[in-house]
Image (cartoon, rainbow, N blue to C red):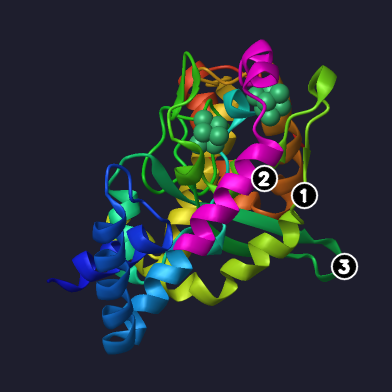
Amino acid sequence: MEEQEIINFIYNVLEAKFAGLNEREIEELVKTAQEYITEYPHLAQIAKDKTISERKTMEMQRKYENSSLCATCGGRCCKNIGCNYLTTDIPSLKEEDILKLLKTNRTSIISDIAIIPQEKNYKVTLLLSARNSHRQIIDLVSVGTPCASLGPNGCKLNFKNRPGEGRHLIPGKYFLCNSDLNIDDEINKWCIYQEILKRMVTKYTNRTLEEELSLEMENFFYDVLCENFYNATFESRLNALTQAEGLIPYFKEEYQKAEERYLAKNNNLRLLNRRKI
Ligand code: SF4
Ligand code: SF4
């Protein structure tokens, strides 16, 4: 048997997937599984971890999922922006695992930009997120658009394959939905994966992170000035305006370039939200 088959075999026995078998056949299966567990403890561990993680997911699903509330709401959270992955969502976070996820066309590398006013600086953390509509694999700064995985009947991903941020959202009445995650802590956990993610930004764009961030920031300002909001919700548009306002002092050159492009295109001084920088 191949390693994966042994893992699946042990897993099925641990989960008591014995439908249609008689007692003697079950005894045989259990005996064989015990032999495998003794002979291949590392594979047995993977099977046990899988069991624990599946049970945890089922528990979460029972606790958090509320299809009727979300159906009434129509997926307001997912219409604003895709949810983020947690580092624990991806088996080993090796380069090949991340690439596999990116190739599904449902995932993007995004950035969290934390402003540190007292240092007049900012900190960029790269992380993975559900892809937004009209967006690419690398989507460091953009106006939030509805998640590309949102279908007419809600999330197209089954509960256990959803990014952790979405799984941890607890639907509430009157859309007072809550999360039991500390988002800042979860973003900080991505710090150790920055080098891998930076390499991927360069792989997909042929630019360094700094070059790509600068270009996307300029495009973001330009989109806000031109009101290129694609299919963004009203809430997302407001967020984009507030976000742009906060970022201009830290990305003055990018804003100037965006403004010049806007003026060249419109050939007048009818600047929306003209800023003093
Ligand atoms: S979690 Fe809340 S905002 Fe999101 S779809 Fe459900 S009820 Fe709506
Ligand atoms: S992945 Fe699913 S839960 Fe997360 S934002 Fe997209 S549609 Fe919503």
Q: Position of residue 92 (x, y in %)?
A: 41, 71
Residue underneath mark 3: 118
Please, what is the three-letter code of the amino acid marked with disc 1? Answer: Asp
Lower sequence index among marks 1 and 2: 2
Task: Let me know if residue 70 is in the magenta part.
Answer: yes
Lower sequence index among marks 3 and 1: 3
Residue underneath mark 1: 180
Q: Quadrant of residue 157?
A: top left
Bounds of the magenta segment = 51-75
Figure quarter occupied by ligand 1: top right
Indicate whether 194 appears above or below 235: below
Q: Residue at x 28, y 42 (%)?
A: 20
Residue underneath mark 2: 168
Query: Is 24 positioned to the left or the right of 195 in the image?
Result: left
Question: Is the Cβ of the residue at disc 1 closer than 8 Å to that at disc 2?
Answer: yes
Q: Which mark is residue 61?
A: none
